[in-house]
Image (tube, grey):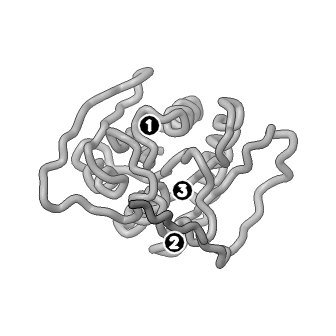
Amino acid sequence: MRLLLSNDDGYQAIGIRTLATEAVKRGHSVLICAPLSEKSAASHFLTLKRPLLVKSAPFDGIETFAIDGSPVDCVRVAKYLSDIPFEFCISGINNGENVGTGIIYSGTDAAAREAVMAYLPAIAISLEQGGTQDMFQYAANIALDMLDHLAENPMPRFTFCNINVPALPSDRIKGVRLSSISESFYTDGYCKRS
């Protein structure tokens, strides 16, 4: 399958590189199109008033492009960088969970949302902070297993799958559970300084 991989942590992030490596091992054709630098909490920001610069930055033979824009910009630009149409988009693996209303702020989720708006099925995947390389590999395989399931059981348009993986050894994870978005929200605030 031809996969578009994006994220909000940047093209050099451990999550997206681990995901790409695992996808290639499974026989997928992969193109990474991700931000040049971290764009966490960029939400659905779209660059309108300046040109987007594209940098080719392949690693381990995987076609990779770094865009000086948002995760949404990356998903939109990617189709111009590939001669082969994409069949699925996976955004992540984000370093830190995206739960509850956090998916509204998340650039990881925005990339998946942009993909489904363009008729491209999508998954957003996040690993709780503190994850090891083994945990990122386990999360990558969860996403790729879900990709196989969703390829045979498509979701409605404007719907994407948001996966959160705890930062635990794989033998301590009990399985996957489908749930609705919680109503939790951030209660942080600001500190006034003079």
Point out which mark residue 124 bears. Answer: 3
Note whether residue 38 is visible.
yes
Q: From the image, tell me which residue sits under label 1.
A: 29
Q: Nearer the viewer, mark 2 or mark 1?
A: 2
Q: Amino acid at mark 1?
A: Ser
Graded by Cα atoms within 10 Å as few (under 14), some (14 to 19) or many (20 or more), the crowding at tag 2 reads some
Residue 136 position within the rendered picture, expressed as x and y whole percent measured from the top left: 64, 37
Provide the secondary structure element on which disc 3 rests. Answer: strand
Residue occupying the point 70% across, 37% down? 135
Q: Nearer the viewer, mark 2 or mark 3?
A: 3
**In this rendering, is residue 63 above or below 48?**
above
**Which numbered disc, 2 or 3, marks the residue that appears first in the sequence?**
3
Residue 187 position within the rendered picture, expressed as x and y whole percent measured from the top left: 60, 71
Q: How many marks?
A: 3
Q: From the image, tell me which residue sits under label 2.
A: 159
Asked which quadrant contains residue 76, the reply is bottom left
